[in-house]
Amino acid sequence: AADVDLAALASTASEGRSGADIELVCRKASLAAIRDFLAAASGCPATLDGFVIRNEHFRTAMCEVGTERCEKPGKEVAP
């Protein structure tokens, strides 16, 4: 997607992380995008038109993996 800055993601996600960590971030982002796409399509779409992995998917995945400081409602910011 146009809102994804791959260079910024690479520098943020890769610092002090293993290749497996980065793969996990990408896998989680893609799964989040698939869930959003299927939810918006209300079932099993005939085509992948409109399927996009957005910056928000990567940011959420990075929070889940612990590669970024994240604020979540009701929780403290991770160190």
Image (cartoon, grey):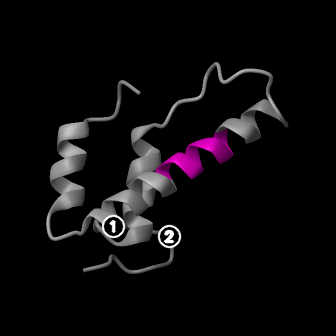
**Pick the front one: 28 or 20:** 20
Q: Position of residue 51 (x, y in %)?
A: 59, 28
Q: Earlier in the sequence, mark 1 or mark 2?
A: 1
Q: Quadrant of residue 45?
A: top right
Region of the chain picked out in magenta, as a range: 29-36
The quadrant of the rendering that contains the C terminus is bottom left
Q: Is residue 55 magenta?
A: no
Q: Please determine whether, in this image, residue 22 is positioned above or below residue 74.
A: above
Amino acid type, callout 2: Pro
Q: Which residue is mark 1?
A: 21
Q: Quadrant of residue 22?
A: bottom left
Q: Please determine whether, in this image, residue 38 is positioned above or below residue 46.
A: below
User: Which mark is drawn over residue 40?
Assistant: none
Q: Is residue 45 left or right of residue 75?
A: right
Asked if the residue under mark 2 is in contact with the one under mark 1, i.e. CB atoms within 8 Å, the reply is: no
Dominant secondary structure, magenta: helix
Q: Is residue 33 magenta?
A: yes
- The residue depicted at 48 percent of the width and 37 percent of the height is 53
Amino acid type, callout 1: Asp
- The residue depicted at 29 percent of the width and 67 percent of the height is 67
Q: Please determine whether, in this image, residue 79 is positioned above or below residue 31.
A: below
Q: CA distance from mark 1 to mark 2?
A: 25 Å
